[in-house]
Amino acid sequence: MASSNYFTPQRGNGFPDKSRLTNALPTYSSAVTEKMHRHSRSMSWTVPVSVPIPGVHSRRLRLFMPNPSRVRQIGISRFGRRRGPILLCVVLIASIITVCSFARRFGTEEKQWTTNFGESSTLVFGRDDLQRIWKWEIDSGHYPSNAKIPEQVGLSVPPLNPALPPRKVPTIPSRFRPPPGPVATTTRGDGPRRVYLDVQSMPPNLAYPPRPVPGSVADLDVIMDHCDFSQGKYVRDCLEVLRVGAGLDNGNRLRRGEMDEWKYIYMEQEKENFTDPFTDPIPIANPIAPPRPLVSGGETDPNAGLRKKVGVDWETQLPLRTPLQHTPYSSLPAPCDPENPRLFHMFWTGPFTDKPYLALLSFLFTQNVGLHLKDGDALNVCRPEFWMWINPGPAASVPNPSALSDMYEGLKTNPWAAPFLHHRFKDVIKFKLWNTTDQLDGIPELKDEWRELRETLFNSGGHIVSVPAEKSQSKSTEVFSTSAIEDSTNSTDADTSAKPLPTGDNKPDEDDMLNRTGSKSSSSYDRLSVILSDMARFVLCHRFGGIYLDADTIFLRDWEELWGWKGAFAYRWSRLEKYNTAVLRMNKNSALGSFLFRTALKNGLDFHPMTVSRYTKDAYLEGLLLRLPDALFDSAWLNTEYYQRERPPQPYFQEFSDFFDTPTQASAAPQALGFEGFFQGAFSYHFHNFWWKPFDASRNWPDLGPKFLAGERAARAAAEPDIDPEDATDRVADDKRDLDWATVLKRTFESYIRGERPNMYGEWLQW
C-alpha cells in the first residue's frame, strides 16, 4: 500500500506545485488553496524576499521588504483609488528630503552625507596635479590609446602623444576647421607608424604556433572593441579573436574572408614626414582654459567639480621626475629597455607548494626564455625574468637575522622548490626575500610617514586587522625588522643556521590568524598574507617595474605583445566595473604610482582592488590604469557568476572548483583536447585560491625525471607514507580514469621539463 506521506514538489517561486488532472490543468481545490495562501500573504505589512549572496551560490539571504499590496490598500482606503498612491509617494519623497537636509544642516563636515548617496571621496589631489599626472604619463609613452581623456581633468590643449601615430587626413583650410571645445579630451599622435601583422604558422611548420615577433605590441584598443563585457562582448568570441590574431590556431583557420578587424598586433616604425591639420600643434598664444565657476570674493576655484576627501587638505604638488622618452623597439640599442624591465613578480608566504611550482613551470613552458638554446648561446630577444618573493613567516612576523640563509635552506630541501635552483634556470627564475620594512622604506612617497599608520597597516577595504604590539614590533620599536637584507641570488655562502622554533607553552598556535603561513583549507584562510600581498604588488611594480601575478595564476601563452604596450593595466572584476589586481602592470617610479601611494597613505594604506578602483575613479585617472576584460586572464569568471552561460568558452566551468574536479559529463575534454583546448587565446588563467586542492591527487609530487629524482622521492614518501619510494611502481590502473584539467596541465608542463615533448611553441629544452 502506498504511504499517504509523500513529498510535495516545489516550484521555483517557493509555492507547492499544483496537482493536475490528466489534461495537465490544475485541480479546482489546489487553485483555490493557493489563491487563499497568496491572499493571506498580501494582508501582511512585509513580505519575505530571498536574494542571492555574491560568491555563495548554494545559499540565499532572506530579507523582509514592505508589502506594496498592503501599502496600496491602506492608501486607497483612506485617500481614494486615484489620490492614495500619489499621496503616499509624495510623503515618502518628502521624508527622504527632510532627513537629508537635516543631516547636511546639522551634521559636522566629517558626518555629512554625500549628495549622491555613494561612497565618500578618496581624492586628495587638485586639478593641477591631475593634469600633470596625465601629461607625464602621455609624454612618457604610457598612453598608446585613442580613448578619451575625461573632461573633468580640464586639459586646455590636446597633448602630444609619442605612442600614437599621426593621423593622415586631407589638408583642410583653417577657416573650415571645427572650433576647439572648452576642454581637450583627445591627444595628438606624434609617434611611430604602426604596421599590423598577419601572424600565422607557415608550411611546413604547422604543428605549433609561431613565437610572437620580438618588439611587437598588442593594440589594447582593438582588444577592448572585441572583448569589453560592458559592450555585450562574449568571452568565447574574445578568445577567438585573441588566438586568431596571434596565430595560435596553428594553421587550422576556419574563418574565410577579410580579417583586418581582428588584427591587434603591430610593430612600430619610424614616423613619416607629413602634416596633420587636426593633430599637429597649432601655436596658441594663450591656451583657452576651461571656465572656472566663481567662489566667494570673485575668485575662481581651480578645483571646481572635484570632490575632495572629507577632513583632509589638498596634497602639496606631487614631485615627478622628468618624463621618459618613448623609443620604438627597432630603435633600442639593445633588446631590453632599462626603463621597461620585463619582470614578473609573485608573492608567496610559507612553505613552497604545488601552486607556485605550477606557476613557474607554466612560465618556462610559455615564455621566450631561451631554454631551447644551449647554455651560453646568445638570445637576441629581451627574455623576461621571474622574481619569486618569499615572505618566510606569518605576515605580521619579524624576520630574523638569518632569514635569507634560512630561506635558501628551506628552498633546497623543499621538493617543490628545489628544481628551480638548478643552474639552467638561474638567469630567468630568481628567489627574493620579502621584508616589509625595507620595501616600504624604498618607496619615496611613503618612507617618512608609513610608520604613523602601523596600527592600521593590515587594511583591506576598510576592514582593519589589528596586530598586537608584541607581534608587530621589534626591539627597535619598528613594525618589521630593519636589518639590511641584500638582494638574493640563486647561490649563497651565508650561514645556514636557523633559530629554533618555540616549544612547549611558548609555541604559537599555527591556526591563529596571526600565525598562519599559507591557506591550508577553506576554514583556515591566511587572510593576513592576502592583505599584505594587496600592498606588495603595488610596491614591487612601483620600485622595480614589471607585472605582478597572483600565485594562483597559470601562464597560457607568450606575453611579448603585452610587454610592448607600455601603459599600466589590471583587469575587470567580473561583471563589475572595478579592478582585479591579480594581474597588475605598472611602470617603475611613474606618476600614476606616486599618485596611488600618496592617495593610499591618506586613506589608511588600503590597497584592496575595490578601494584602488575608487582612487582612480575619484581622480578621473581610470584611463591610465586600463581595466582590461577578464577574458584575457580570468576567462571562467563570468560563467561562475551565471553570466554568458548560453555561449560559454571552452572549457565551460560553472564553478572554479571544476578546474580541479572536472564534472563527469565534461571529463573527456581534458585528455582529448589537452593544453591547446584550455581557454586558448587567453594570456593566463586564474583559478581563484583552492590552495589546499592538489593539482594531481593521484601523483601529488613533482614528476620531473631523473635530474630531480631525490626531490620526487621525498615528496612521494610524504604523499604515500606506506610505500617505499624506491620500490614504488607506477601503474596506469592506479591512476584516475578521467583526468581533471588541473592534472592535465601539470603533467603537460612536467613532460616538457623531462624532455618528452616541446613547449607550446615547438621548442625543446636543452640541458
Image (tube, rainbow, N blue to C red):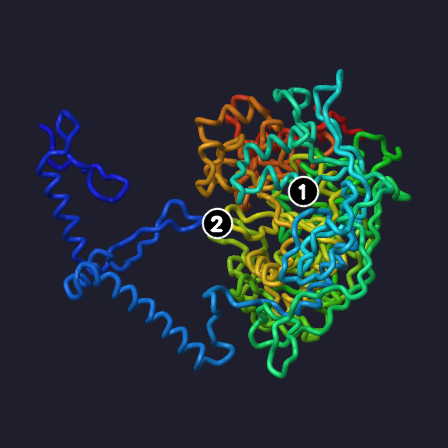
At 74% from the left edge and 56% from the top edge, which residue is drawn?
158
**Looking at this view, is 237 or 403 the one in front?**
237
Q: Position of residue 415 (x, y in %)?
A: 67, 41
At 42% from the left edge and 77% from the top edge, which residue is drawn?
103
Residue linked to disc 1: 220
Residue linked to disc 2: 522
Q: CA distance from mark 2 to mark 1?
A: 36 Å
At 49% from the left edge and 27% from the top edge, which residue is drawn?
667
**Looking at this view, is 233 or 46 the one in front?**
233
Q: Amino acid at mark 2?
A: Ser
Q: Secondary structure at mark 2?
A: loop
In the image, taking residue 72 as reference, residue 728 lies left or right, namely: right
Q: Position of residue 53 (x, y in %)?
A: 40, 51
Is the residue 633 above or below the residue 73 in the image?
A: above
Q: Position of residue 757 (x, y in %)?
A: 70, 24
Is residue 191 in view from this perspective? yes
At 24% from the left edge and 57% from the top edge, which residue is drawn?
68
Is residue 439 in view from this perspective? no
Is the residue 264 above or below the residue 102 in the image?
A: above
Q: Work out which residue is located at the far right of the displayed protein and give it.
A: 333
Where does the C terminus fall, quadrant-wise? top right
Residue neighbourhood size for the residue with mark 1, other residues' Cα within 10 Å, grouped as few (<14), some (14–19), many (≥20)? many
- The tag earlier along the polypeptide, 2 or 1, is 1
